[in-house]
Each structure stands twice: as structure tokens, then as C-alpha cells.
Image (spheres, helix red, strand yellow):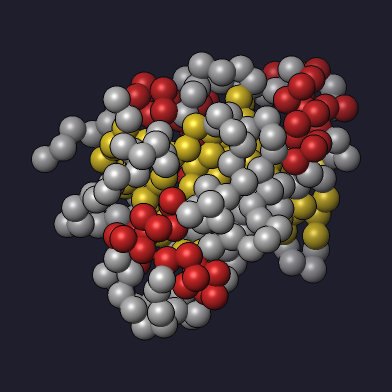
């Protein structure tokens, strides 16, 4: 049995000593749940957390929500709150909110008003797996850490257009064909490909690959991802459980 990773180690992986700190969640299979868990983690560490998006997302019903044109124009009292969400507009036709452009979040980070900003920077339409399109993901240049989420519960199961968002791109990157069983080598190719899981990650930012809902009966197979420096850390677990991360591999 592996030791459960300590919270301090997870915060270290996230470059949590940086201030201000912007973390972007991309991929499929639990981005919003991951951001809620990270918000909990940082709040417990005494940090002030803002949740937002560069795309569209459902309204967080457990957080105070503010709508504004540009977050850096909000009064100083706003930035003293421990945990809140901020977006640019409500979209009644979809029941979602629209976030801010990467440039707007870069301006926020440059202002020094924020402490920790957690950004949903990708969309997957509820699928557990995806490959990014030309215009995806939408990661601000000021991002310190990208967490690429994969719905690892799909390992060993058949995949195809009905289970993978942007299937033609995923197939091209991983070599998978419709009705193939999802394998570790396919996921490794997704992580390593320049147009794969970490597409658009700013140079120098930390890269964490999060295998969400990986079965405890499934051996964690990092391949040569850490040795090749494709990622800085690999996390496995279920972000809606506690502890959320039960296995961790990190570059020494």
C-alpha cells in the first residue's frame, strides 16, 4: 500500500509559494470538481481564492458569485474574501456563465490584487476524455501551473466518438481507432504530443497530469513521462473523495 501524499507535497507540486498564483485546469473528466477541491486546499492553507473561467461553465452554487466586466476594477474589499467566484456574464440560454479572456486575467495578475486564481481553461461537454481543438485550451500567459485532467476510469474500456470529445483529434494523436480499449500507451501519447493534453501551456509553468477516478486496482503507469520531463508530477485519485489524491509520482 502506498502512502497517501501529504497536502504540503501537493501544494509544492502546484508551485504554491508563488504569489499571485494562477492555476489552469484543462482536459476532461473532472475539471470543475478539481478546481473546487483545489480551492478547498488553498483556503485551508490560508490563501484567498478566486474561481473563474476563460470559457463557459455552470454557476458554482456553493460560492458567492460576482459578475463584472473586468475583475481588476472591483473594490479592494472584494479581494479580502477567502473564497469566491467571478465571471463576466450570465448566459441564460445555456444556464452557464462566461468568464474572462486570457488577456483580462493576465491584467489581473499584473495588478497584484489577486492571491490564488483558479481557472477552468477548457471545455469537454461532459466527456471523460478529449483532445484540444485549434482554439483550445484558453490558458493565460501568466499561468504558473497547468493541471491536465484525464478521466482514468475509462482505462480498459472501449472508446470512440460516443465517449471521447473531439474524437478525430484524439484518434490522430493517440493512434486509437473506434472500439479500441483505452490503454496506458494511448494516454502517454496524449500527454507527450505537442497538441495533446498540455497544448498551450506557457513555457516554464509546472505541468501536473491528474488521473481522476483511477481504480485502486489499476497500477499507476507513468511510463517515461517524468524522466523525459513531459510532466513535473502525476497525481491519481478521485477529486470528489477525501483524500482526493492517493498516489503521486514526481520528478526528483
Q: Position of residue 97 (x, y in %)?
A: 75, 53
Query: On the image, which quarter does residue 100 sit in?
Result: top right
The residue lying toward the viewer, choosing from 179 and 115, is: 179
* Side (left or right) of 135 relative to 239: right
Q: Is residue 134 left or right of residue 229?
A: right
Toward which corner of the image does residue 8 lie, by quadrant? top left
Q: Nearer the viewer, residue 101 or 252?
A: 252
As rendered, which of 169 and 82 lies closer to the eye? 169
Q: Position of residue 53 (x, y in %)?
A: 68, 46
The quadrant the C terminus occupies is top left
Is residue 147 shown above or below 161? above
> Residue 9, percent across and down?
34, 24
Q: Is residue 208 above or below residue 31?
A: above
Image quarter of the N terminus = top left
- Can residue 129 be seen here? yes
Q: From the viewer's perspective, is residue 215 above or below residue 207? A: below
Q: Residue at 77% across / 52% down in the picture? A: 98
Q: In screen coordinates, is 70 left or right of 245?
A: right
**Total number of numbered labels?**
0
Query: Residue visible at 32% across and 32% down?
Result: 250
Q: Which residue is the extreme one toward the left?
A: 1
Q: Residue sitting at 61 percent across and 17 percent down? A: 19
Report the residue that reaches farthest toward the bottom. 179
Residue 212 drawn above or below residue 62:
below
**Residue 196 x, y percent position in the rendering:** 51, 56
Q: Is residue 44 visible?
A: no
Amino acid at each position: 500500500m502506498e502512502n497517501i501524499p501529504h497536502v504540503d507535497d501537493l501544494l509544492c507540486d502546484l508551485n504554491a509559494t508563488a504569489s499571485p498564483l494562477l492555476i489552469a485546469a484543462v482536459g476532461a473528466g473532472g475539471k470543475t470538481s478539481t478546481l473546487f477541491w483545489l480551492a478547498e486546499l488553498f483556503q485551508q492553507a490560508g490563501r484567498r481564492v478566486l474561481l473563474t473561467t476563460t470559457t463557459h461553465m455552470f454557476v458554482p452554487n456553493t460560492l458567492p458569485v460576482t459578475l463584472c466586466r473586468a475583475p481588476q476594477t472591483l473594490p479592494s474589499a472584494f479581494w479580502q474574501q477567502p473564497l469566491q467566484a467571478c465571471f463576466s456574464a450570465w448566459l441564460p440560454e445555456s444556464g452557464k456563465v462566461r468568464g474572462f479572456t486570457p488577456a483580462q486575467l493576465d491584467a489581473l495578475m499584473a495588478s497584484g490584487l489577486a492571491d490564488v486564481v483558479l481557472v477552468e481553461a477548457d471545455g469537454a461537454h461532459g466527456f471523460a476524455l478529449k483532445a484540444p481543438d485549434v482554439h483550445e485550451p484558453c490558458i493565460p500567459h501568466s499561468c504558473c501551473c497547468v493541471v491536465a485532467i484525464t478521466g482514468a476510469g475509462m482505462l480498459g474500456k472501449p472508446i470512440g466518438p460516443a465517449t471521447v470529445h473531439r474524437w478525430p483529434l484524439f484518434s490522430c494523436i493517440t493512434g486509437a481507432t473506434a472500439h479500441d480499449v483505452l490503454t496506458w500507451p494511448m494516454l502517454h501519447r496524449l500527454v507527450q504530443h505537442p497538441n495533446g493534453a498540455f497544448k498551450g501551456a506557457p513555457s516554464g509553468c509546472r505541468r501536473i497530469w491528474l488521473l481522476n477516478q483511477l481504480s485502486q486496482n489499476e497500477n499507476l503507469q507513468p511510463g517515461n513521462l517524468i524522466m523525459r520531463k513531459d510532466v513535473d508530477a502525476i497525481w491519481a485519485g478521485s477529486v470528489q473523495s477525501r483524500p482526493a489524491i492517493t498516489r503521486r509520482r514526481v520528478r526528483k
